[in-house]
Image (spheres, rainbow, N blue to C red):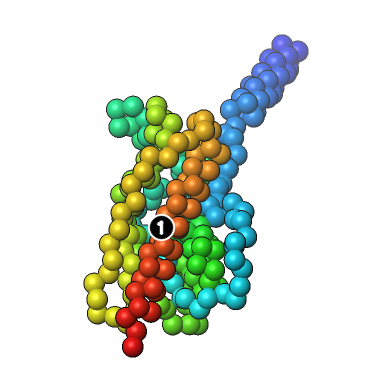
């Protein structure tokens, strides 16, 4: 009877030790927390000639994405064409939402307009322009430390039968290091450059309309 109780006691101790070991392994092997990143958070300088906001109304988007930007994880292009997805570093709300948010904020700043909105929008004002985008490439190339950028975009004047203006931004932007924060900063720089180009074309189009107006 004593031997039997002793065996049960030893079994209980063994079970407790195994349970403790499993719980410790679970703690040690716990995945790190997912970090989320949002574009459009960089503070922009005040306009050099502030005045009353212009009344240009612009809808930014939609944007067609390459397959690696359809995933929430931040993509990194490795040697041999391998794409690594940073499992614990993700775009908040998805890349398209964050991209269009950042571009619309930048364009509102560059145009000095309070009527620039991101797709989809139910803004209570009529539009002057639509900016439609097709992102062919926008990815961090790890071995070259660059953000490879190729974005096509169309500028559509609402209410006109004229064909849209078609434009291309192609660049290799340097990335300071290979941290996720440095990659996100490079995305912000690419979007800021795109915003300035879109604003320049809109201003050019507006200047042409004024030139030819009766």
Q: Position of residue 210 (x, y in %)?
A: 38, 79
Q: Residue furthest bottom?
A: 214
Which residue is drawn at the image coordinates 60% and 76% (left, top)? Answer: 52
Q: Does residue 71 sit above or below 125 in this rendering?
A: above
Q: Position of residue 133 (x, y in %)?
A: 34, 60
Q: Position of residue 77 (x, y in %)?
A: 37, 34
Say whether residue 204 is visible: yes
Residue 181 appears left or right of 212: right
Which residue is drawn at the image coordinates 53% and 71% (left, top)? Answer: 113
- Label 1: how many residues lie within 10 Å, few (<14), some (14-19) or many (20+)? some
Q: Does residue 122 sit above or below 152 in this rendering?
A: below
Depth check: 103 or 67 in front? 103
Say whether residue 4 is visible: no
Place residue 168 in its image quadrant: bottom left
Q: Position of residue 182 (x, y in %)?
A: 53, 37
Secondary structure under tag 1 reads helix
In which quadrant is the C terminus drawn? bottom left
Place residue 14 in its image quadrant: top right
Which residue is drawn at the image coordinates 58% and 43% (left, top)? Answer: 35
Residue 159 appears left or right of 86: left
- Residue beneath disc 1: 197
Residue 205 appears left or right of 176: left
Q: Does residue 113 sit above or below 178 in this rendering?
A: below
């Amino acid at each position: 009877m004593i031997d039997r109780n002793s065996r049960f006691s030893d079994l209980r101790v063994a079970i407790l030790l195994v349970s403790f070991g499993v719980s410790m392994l679970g703690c040690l092997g716990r995945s790190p927390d997912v970090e989320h990143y949002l574009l459009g958070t960089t503070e922009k300088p005040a306009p050099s000639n502030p005045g009353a906001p212009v009344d240009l109304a612009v809808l930014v988007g939609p944007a067609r994405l390459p397959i690696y930007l359809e995933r929430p994880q931040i993509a990194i292009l490795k040697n041999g064409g391998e794409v690594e997805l940073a499992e614990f570093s993700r775009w908040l709300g998805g890349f398209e939402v964050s991209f269009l948010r950042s571009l619309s904020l930048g364009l509102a700043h560059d145009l000095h307009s309070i009527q620039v909105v991101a797709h989809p929008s139910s803004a209570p004002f009529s539009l002057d322009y639509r900016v439609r985008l097709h992102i062919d490439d926008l990815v961090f190339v790890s071995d070259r430390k660059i953000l490879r950028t190729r974005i096509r975009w169309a500028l559509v004047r609402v209410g006109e039968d004229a064909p849209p203006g078609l434009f291309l931004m192609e660049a290799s932007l340097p990335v300071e290091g290979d941290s996720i924060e440095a990659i996100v900063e490079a995305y912000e720089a690419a979007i800021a450059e795109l915003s300035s180009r879109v604003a320049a074309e809109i201003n050019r189009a507006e200047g042409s309309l004024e030139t030819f107006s009766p």
